[in-house]
Image (cartoon, rainbow, N blue to C red):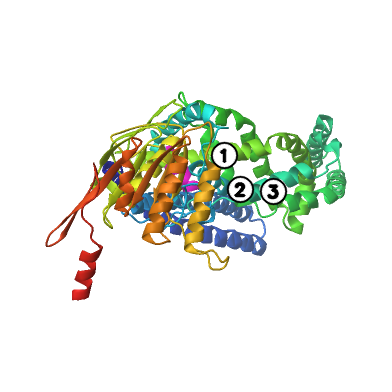
Amino acid sequence: MNKTLNAYYKEQILKLKENITSLKAKNTSYIICEITTFIGIIAFIVLYILYTNSLWNLLGSGICLALYILTRYYDGKNSENIENLTSLKKTYQQEVDYFNGNFSCFDQGNKYIDANHPFTLNIDIFGNQSLFQRINRCITTTGADYLAACLAEENTESNKISKIKQIKQRTLSIKTLSADEPLITQFKAIGASKTIDTNAIKMMLEKISQINIPRLFSFTPFTWLRRISLVGFYIAILCSFMGYCSFSTPITWAAINFCVSFFASYRYIKLVNNALQGILNNTNSYLRIIRLIENVNTDKAEELKQIKTHLMGALKAFESIQRLLQKIDGRSNEFGVVLLNTLKLTDLSILCSFANLQANIKLNTESWINDVSTFDALISMANFRLNEDKATDANIVQSKEVVFKADNIYHPFLGENAVKNNFYIEPLSYYIITGANMAGKSTFLRTIGINYILAMNGLPVFADSLTVSIFHLFTSMRTTDDLAKGISYFNAELLRLKLLISSLQPTMPNLIILDEILKGTNSLDKLNGSRLFLEYVAKRNVTGIIATHDLELSKMETDKRFHNYCFEIELGNNITYSYKITKGVARNQNATYLLKDILKG
């Protein structure tokens, strides 16, 4: 883990605490000033009423009103700054918690758990303390969905050709973003208080595109006619004060403005209001995301360039939506409806803006959502790379065979104290790994699987070096029974092996990782069944790693494709675990030894 970055995060938290305290002190001053100026407004108005010929009181009231409005403005800005800094502080604190091994503030991804998936359940991709939970910093719901889909993507014959190019582009995108820590933190801070509901955004955009607004409102001449009417109205007011016309002229004009704007728009304004209702916070957050993406330095990252290009129209569209929401919010009561339609023809303005917005949204909604979701997931991946500075890039090679060559590979969950191992897989070979309980067999299998998934996503791997090809991965390590469905443990194992066989890609290399084949039956039956299964898959385009306690299975090494490896332990006064993989068959077991200790009390 990046210790320098952890220290930087802690330093930023302290600075932000000081800034927030200072801004909160200003807030108190603003409140006092608001109360004082408001009292001043009332006092000067009372004095103006009580005393004749006291224009200075009216002037004083006007000055207090101006000061009150100004103070309210700066108070709002100050509160906004406090909110933004608080979000930044929370974001930094979450990363400090990450370095301390506390992942509870991050989504576990339980909804993505699928017991029938080829590998995600067995190598801890989703769930408590999972890879997803350690990587995920997504601030949108569809961003998390996209990240989950990337980590769970199954290599098949249909995607193997484009996969290497995709991985290289993804690696470059992640590298580019990880070089900009302020951008990553600002992005995460947008969703620090609440995850943005992309489905709500999508539903809003769909509603906007479906509302049938008369084409009249989108015509440019109509927009100009509305503006000319407003200009004429204000000229009439000015002329009435200068004595060129009576006050009845602007009053009549005002009445016409209100009637035309309100009654011509009433039916459609209700539809627009229903479409945009309750979406202000999500829209503001989405707009902040798009503005951040607009300013991203894409460098040579083609994927980031494409995202920026696709979102060029989105910024204008969401700014229009934000303005529409503000206008609708301003007319949320009867007084606002009358005043704004009289002075600004607001309802007509809303419909003109809405009609122009519709055409853009109909064409681009799906593309915008997908691009923002992709960028959201990329930020999470870049953050992971930034935090894990000891990890390295994998070397992805084109090959029709399984290639897996690892130097000093270790499990990412174990940190820098993990015991590292070298492991080289020969294509169409089978590695029988024996060893005592808790010697490291299962962890090693997961180490192979999880680092491969990291490599396939352009993420850094936990090894001094790792060279891999594109192959199909299938694991079977956590089979469980299902009493509700009447599936016994042994039957569940058979179903998993059946699923394995059906998932094999005939024209693509396959790697299977198995932990104890058929452990739900007796020893002899298990041995015979394991041999039968391995002999069957050995005739196909399959390479395998199999952990077992059954030492008899190691005798399959008579076939040159089978190789014996083990995790050995040393028995003495205490058991010594080396967690190092070596060639050969394990000699020592620990079950009886440990049981004797328990029975001794």
* Cβ–Cβ under 8 Å for marks 1 and 3: no
Question: If the image is split into quadrants, where does the N terminus sit?
Answer: top left
Residue 370 drawn at (x, y percent): 60, 39
Amino acid type shown at disc 2: Thr
Closer-to-camera residue (3/288): 3
User: Whole-Å distance between the Cαs marked 1 and 3?
Assistant: 16 Å
- What is the magenta range? 183-190
User: Whole-Å distance between the Cαs marked 2 and 3?
Assistant: 9 Å
* Cβ–Cβ under 8 Å for marks 2 and 1: yes
Question: If the image is split into quadrants, where does the C terminus sit?
Answer: bottom left
Amino acid type shown at disc 3: Met
Identify residue for label 2: 198
Secondary structure, magenta segment, majority class: helix
User: Whole-Å distance between the Cαs marked 2 and 1?
Assistant: 10 Å
Q: Is residue 262 visible?
A: no
Which tag, 2 or 3, sits closer to the chain's start? 2
Residue at the far left: name it: 573
Identify residue for label 3: 203
Residue visible at 58% across and 65% down in the picture: 485
